[in-house]
Amino acid sequence: MGGKSNWTVVGEIMRSLRAGAGMSLTDAAQVLGMSKGHLSHVECGRDRPGVGLIERYEEMFGADGLLWSAYIAARTNRRALPHPATDGRYPVPGDAMRFVRDVTIPDGTVLPPEFPFRKVWRVGNVGSVPWRGRWLARVGSPFGHGIPWSPSRVRIDDTEPGRVVDIEVPMRTQRMSGTAQVRWKIVDEDGWDFFPDPERLGLLLTIIVDEDAPPPTGSGERR
């Protein structure tokens, strides 16, 4: 299948946090009261960490919520297995997408907790295939501890080749201060990915929640 698994990504973040703090694997295992081998397997993505371990890494290494976000995505993401009727259907020959710009809430925007906003991406249909009946689907849970709320998917307006389209998603920031990242992919009515290459990350949103942050202007929220 290729590409990294979600648990490998979680492990890499854990290893990066520990190494960035200057703590060896041996010392971390001793502090956490677990075997070095098990912790090594977790950081390599071979073993899955429990909630308690994620909490300790967040606290010990100041993960600022980013590890929580990756952990929840790993726990809730379910890859669609090939279906006999649709196996080989995607990607569609000639189908191509290009990110144009963030219309609202650029990556790294600092927002207050539980703040409602509308995220808008502008993307271009740069292929030769008309877009019909497409959705932007969230990868992982649409809500949870340390991650922003959103619907699980939104409809994409039909878009001809050579045209651009704005994709709008209503969202609300998480209650917990820190950084969160959400990933989205373009799918059909049944949830099949039009661009199934695992190396294609899709559309990303990274936000930082700070309880002292003022509401931004141009957030896109309609009151």
Image (cartoon, rainbow, N blue to C red):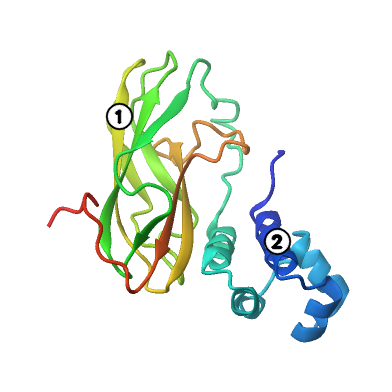
Report crowding for label 2: few under 14, some 14 to 19, many 20 or more residues within 10 A (C-alpha): some
* Residue 36 quadrant: bottom right
Is any atom of residue 164 visible in this view? yes
Q: Please name the amino acid that badge 2 sits on.
A: Ser
Q: Please name the amino acid that badge 1 sits on.
A: Val
Write the residue at 56% across / 45% down: 80
SS at badge 1: strand
Q: How many numbered discs, if any?
A: 2
Q: Single out the residue that lies furthest toward the left.
A: 223
Please state which of residues 58 and 72 is positioned toward the viewer in this rendering: 58
Residue 48 spot, x, y in % from top left: 71, 67
Vertical arrangement, residue 25 with respect to residue 91, above or below? below
SS at badge 2: helix
Please state which of residues 135 and 126 is positioned toward the viewer in this rendering: 126
Residue 76 spot, x, y in % from top left: 53, 60
Q: Circle 1 sits on which residue?
A: 165
Residue 102 spot, x, y in % from top left: 35, 40
Write the residue at 39% across / 41% down: 136
Please state which of the two labelled residues, at mark 2 or mark 1, is closer to the viewer.
2
Report whether 185 appears left or right of 11.
Answer: left
* Residue 128 quadrant: top left
Report crowding for label 1: few under 14, some 14 to 19, many 20 or more residues within 10 A (C-alpha): some
Report whether 223 appears left or right of 209.
Answer: left
Q: Earlier in the sequence, mark 2 or mark 1?
A: 2
CA separation in Å, label 2 and label 1: 37 Å
Say which mark, if any, is on residue 217.
none
Write the residue at 55% across / 41% down: 201
Vertical arrangement, residue 18 with respect to residue 203, above or below? below
Residue 65 spot, x, y in % from top left: 51, 68
Q: Circle 2 sits on which residue?
A: 16
* Residue 155 quadrant: top left
